[in-house]
């Protein structure tokens, strides 16, 4: 074992495996291998197929392209997947033939594809894809230039069906006949009209006779609460099924029923999920309420029952739910299942699972088939410990404390609080590294990192999830600071050396901590809200403020004022680093500029970094590297008194010094 921890570059270079898809016969599985390509500054995904019979894995996609969305044919002999190629990011539908051990391009699709499903009748592929641009819109662009009528021209996706025999015939004809001697057939049918609704996802019945559609009115995220469940039958007739606020769905093994996750109350954002089952012959319904206070998601409906997943106590669990709502847990507290896939008989299962001691690996029927852990350099690793404390109003708060291997409770350490986003997400007690915040590197410098699951976090029941309603910021601050005080009282945290950082909702809470009080030595605000009015009028998800603040800013300005970091800007004294994507539509950049200018005019040390072309999240390894290095420089300066400027500005000489260490 080395005497040092991972560097930022080593951490971002670690391979990640995820999204297992098991074959119908349970003998093979496909999964995604994600790696950083430093030459092109891209993350590339490769489709890998594992054959249990011979215990070997094969890369079936081109490592030079980004590939995803694998799905098996019903006979388990072929695999379809999406390949993004070329400067125009073309959408190639690829086929891997397992018997011939070859991959070929079936066709190129004009528009972005979000889902691929192989027909259970083995006669074609269903695609959820963006609808082609209309001739009318093309003409308008030619005549007037490009502009948009806001909220009036949604870019909806539709459902398409590729005729497999026709597509295969066209593929083969290139080797058999000259172009002028080939007959052209329509390769695909468009099954839905984008003018009627948007298709966000689909599920196929095992017998191949039905397709269920998740169909919000438009692709505008504000319309997703009004999604309907639509059903296409074998004659391609479309009808609506009686569900309100659907979240996800799966068909029964005999294809006679459809199970849909719906809120168990009236609030689609805050309530736990219940399962409603509709009989497709007469549309009668029954409901299954989970016995425990858990917010479940459907994985699969098998002959053994429902496989479901849920977040609980800083992990993601997998279990088997029966028709009475009784849940059998299949994983323990130290196991985290990020994704899973199950055969219809429920006898074979593939998972992407990690623990607090091992990174994500792919498992088939409980047996590990990947070895990404050996790709990790022999480095020290951060220890993760679940802790809990009481907030100032008596609410029990849980969190994860990141410690060095040689932690000594008799010493006093600097502390940085890392606040997760969401807010309905959770800090995970597993070996999943952040690509925004340098947890490993801070710990290597002797800084502890606390990840609080503040009120509103997922994994602690319905009532806890609702505790931040009309209590954003203020309640969050108390949960964070009470956690800091808890560690100070234990004697191993220096009260004068505490920082706070977070992205998105975590960035908002960090901004609130920076202006509301003076408890923090330094703060980092990533893609955070600084003023709820500014956010509400600029964001692409206006429903957020209605759901969490209860009203709009013109009818209830007081709640917007109470919960906005800018309200307290005159009290601010915390040196703050602000990081924001220049093309962020979720939390638009005016939030960053408002906080930046406010802190500047209050003479508080502040730096603003705008990442040009970046949205709400970073999608390039170079951007993640910059974000992490800037955060490391910021907290190393304010908590450890290290020089700031060269490190913050990413001067090469400073990077080389870090690598030498």
Image (cartoon, rainbow, N blue to C red):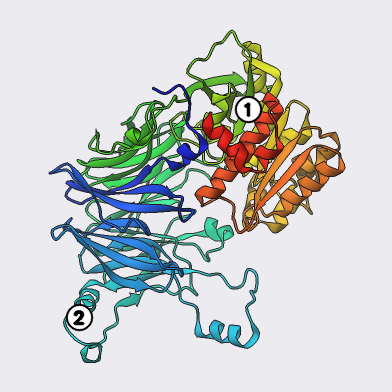
Local crowd size for mark 2, using a 10 Å CA cut-off: few (<14), some (14–19), many (≥20) = some
Picture coordinates of residue 489 (x, y %)? Answer: 65, 12
Position of 332 relative to 206 (above/below): above
Position of 465 relative to 40 (above/below): above
Quadrant in the picture for the N terminus: top left
Quadrant of residue 513 within the rendered picture: top right
Position of 545 relative to 241 (above/below): above
Picture coordinates of residue 487 (x, y %)? Answer: 62, 17
Q: CA distance from mark 1 to mark 2?
A: 62 Å
Residue furthest top as drawn: 410
Quadrant of residue 94 within the rendered picture: bottom left
Query: Residue, x 78% and y 52% (percent of image)?
Result: 555
Residue furthest bottom as drawn: 180
Look at the image and tell me whether residue 506 can be seen: no
Q: Is residue 462 left or right of residue 598?
A: left
Query: Of 56 and 632, which appears nearest the observer?
Result: 632
Quadrant of residue 439 within the rendered picture: top right
The residue where tag 2 is placed is 173
The reply to whether the C-beta atoms of the residues labelled 1 and 2 are less than 8 Å apart is no
Picture coordinates of residue 179 (x, y %)? Answer: 25, 88
| Label 1 secondary element | strand
Local crowd size for mark 1, using a 10 Å CA cut-off: few (<14), some (14–19), many (≥20) = many
Query: Residue, x 52% and y 64% (percent of image)?
Result: 219
| Label 2 secondary element | helix
User: Which of the numbered marks, if any, corresponds to residue 80?
Assistant: none
Look at the image and tell me whether residue 524 can be seen: yes
User: Which of the numbered marks, if any, corresponds to residue 416?
Assistant: 1
Mark found first going from the N terminus, 1 or 2: 2
Q: Is residue 471 left or right of residue 455?
A: right
Picture coordinates of residue 339 (x, y %)? Answer: 36, 43
Query: Of 122 and 329, which appears nearest the observer?
Result: 122
Query: Of 608 and 263, which appears nearest the observer?
Result: 608
């Amino acid at each position: 074992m080395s005497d040092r921890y991972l560097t930022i570059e080593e951490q971002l270079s670690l391979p990640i495996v995820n999204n297992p898809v098991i074959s119908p016969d349970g003998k093979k599985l496909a999964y995604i291998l994600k790696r950083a390509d430093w030459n092109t500054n891209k993350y590339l995904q490769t489709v890998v197929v594992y054959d249990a019979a011979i215990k070997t894995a094969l890369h079936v996609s081109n490592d030079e392209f980004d590939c995803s969305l694998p799905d098996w044919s019903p006979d388990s002999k072929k695999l379809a997947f999406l390949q993004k190629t070329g400067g125009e990011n073309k959408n190639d539908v690829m086929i891997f033939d397992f018997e011939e051990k070859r991959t070929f391009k079936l066709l190129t699709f004009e528009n972005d594809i979000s889902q691929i499903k192989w027909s259970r009748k083995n006669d074609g592929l269903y695609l959820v894809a963006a609808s082609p641009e209309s001739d009318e819109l093309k003409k308008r662009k030619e005549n007037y230039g490009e502009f948009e009528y806001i909220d009036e021209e949604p870019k909806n996706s539709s459902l398409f069906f590729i005729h497999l025999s026709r597509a295969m015939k066209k593929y083969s004809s290139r080797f058999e006949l000259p172009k002028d001697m080939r007959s052209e057939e329509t390769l695909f049918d468009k099954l839905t009209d984008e003018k009627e609704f948007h298709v966000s996802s689909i599920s196929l019945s095992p017998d191949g006779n039905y397709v269920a559609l998740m169909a919000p009115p438009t692709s505008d995220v504000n319309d997703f609460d009004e999604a309907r469940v639509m059903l296409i039958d074998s004659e391609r007739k479309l009808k609506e099924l009686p569900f309100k606020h659907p979240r996800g769905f799966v068909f029964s093994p005999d294809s006679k029923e459809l199970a849909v996750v719906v809120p168990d109350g009236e609030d689609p954002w805050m309530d736990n999920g219940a399962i409603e089952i509709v009989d497709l012959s007469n549309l009668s319904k029954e409901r299954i309420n989970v016995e425990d206070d858990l917010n479940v998601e459907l994985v699969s409906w098998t002959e053994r029952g429902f496989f479901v997943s849920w977040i609980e106590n800083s992990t993601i669990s997998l279990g088997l739910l029966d028709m009475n709502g009784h849940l059998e847990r299949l994983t323990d507290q130290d196991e985290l299942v990020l994704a899973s896939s199950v055969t219809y008989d429920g006898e074979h299962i593939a998972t992407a699972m990690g623990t607090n001691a091992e990174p994500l690996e792919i498992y088939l029927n409980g047996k590990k088939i990947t070895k990404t852990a050996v790709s990790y350099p022999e480095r020290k690793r951060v220890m993760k410990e679940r802790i809990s404390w009481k907030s100032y109003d008596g609410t029990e708060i849980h969190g994860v404390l990141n410690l060095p291997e040689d932690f000594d409770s008799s010493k006093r350490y600097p502390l940085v609080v890392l606040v997760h986003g969401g807010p309905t997400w959770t800090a995970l007690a597993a070996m999943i590294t952040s690509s925004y915040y340098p947890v490993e590197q801070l710990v290597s410098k002797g800084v502890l990192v606390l990840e609080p699951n503040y009120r509103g976090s997922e994994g602690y029941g319905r009532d806890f999830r609702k505790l931040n309603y009309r209590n954003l910021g203020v309640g969050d601050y108390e949960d964070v600071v009470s956690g800091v005080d808890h560690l100070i009282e234990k004697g191993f945290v220096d009260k004068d050396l505490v920082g706070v950082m977070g992205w998105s909702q975590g960035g908002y809470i960090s901004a609130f901590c920076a202006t509301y009080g003076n408890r923090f030595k330094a703060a980092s605000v990533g893609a955070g809200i600084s003023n709820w009015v500014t956010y509400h009028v600029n964001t692409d998800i206006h429903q957020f403020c209605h759901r969490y603040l209860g009203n709009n800013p013109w009818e209830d300005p007081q709640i917007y004022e109470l919960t906005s970091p800018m309200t307290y800007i005159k009290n601010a004294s915390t040196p703050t680093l602000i990081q924001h994507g220049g093309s962020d539509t979720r939390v638009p950049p005016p939030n960053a500029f408002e906080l930046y200018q406010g802190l500047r005019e209050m003479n508080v040390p502040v730096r603003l970094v705008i990442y040009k072309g970046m949205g709400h999240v970073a999608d390039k390894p170079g951007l993640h590297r910059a974000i992490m290095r800037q955060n490391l420089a910021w907290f190393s300066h304010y908590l450890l008194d290290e020089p700031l400027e060269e490190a913050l500005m990413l001067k090469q000489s400073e990077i080389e010094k870090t690598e030498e260490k």
